[in-house]
Image (cartoon, rainbow, N blue to C red):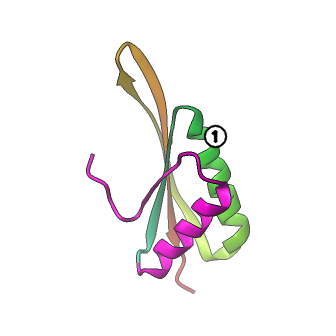
Amino acid sequence: MAAEENVIIIGKKSIADYVLSAILIFNEGYDEVIIRGQGPNVSKAVDVYNALYSRLKDGIELVGVTIDSIERGRRLIPVIEIKVRRKII
């Protein structure tokens, strides 16, 4: 999967750092941001969305959530992608 500029991959940073990243992506002119978490970071991705929503309220809308899994060796790793769109007011 090629790295896209409007995709935030959740890792070890704080939730506030990812919220700031999403806001910066919107400020760069993108209308959509994808928050992607896998494995133990699935719940953190949801936390990032909730924090972003509480910060921007009516400025964003949830476009969709994709839940999937990828195979690593013999294990299945859960993956979530949360697509958020900026509302034009």
Q: For the N terminus, which image quadrant?
A: top left
Q: Residue furthest top?
A: 74
Task: Check if residue 9 falls in the magenta segment.
Answer: yes
Q: Residue drawn at (57%, 39%), measured in percent from left and top?
A: 42
Q: Quadrant of residue 15?
A: bottom right
Q: Position of residue 41 (x, y in %)?
A: 57, 39
Task: Check if residue 47 falls in the magenta segment.
Answer: no
As drawn, 82 above or below 33: above
As drawn, 54 above or below 45: below
Q: Nearer the viewer, residue 9 or 82?
A: 9
Q: Residue furthest left?
A: 2
Q: Residue drawn at (58%, 67%), measured in percent from left and top?
A: 61
Q: Position of residue 49 (x, y in %)?
A: 62, 56
Magenta residues, start to end: 1-29
Neighbours of disc 1 within 10 Å: few (<14), some (14-19), many (20+): some
Q: Position of residue 88 (x, y in %)?
A: 52, 83
Q: For the C terminus, which image quadrant?
A: bottom right
As drawn, 38 above or below 4: above
Give the residue type at disc 1: Ser
Under circle 1, the secondary element is: helix
* Residue assigned mark 1: 43
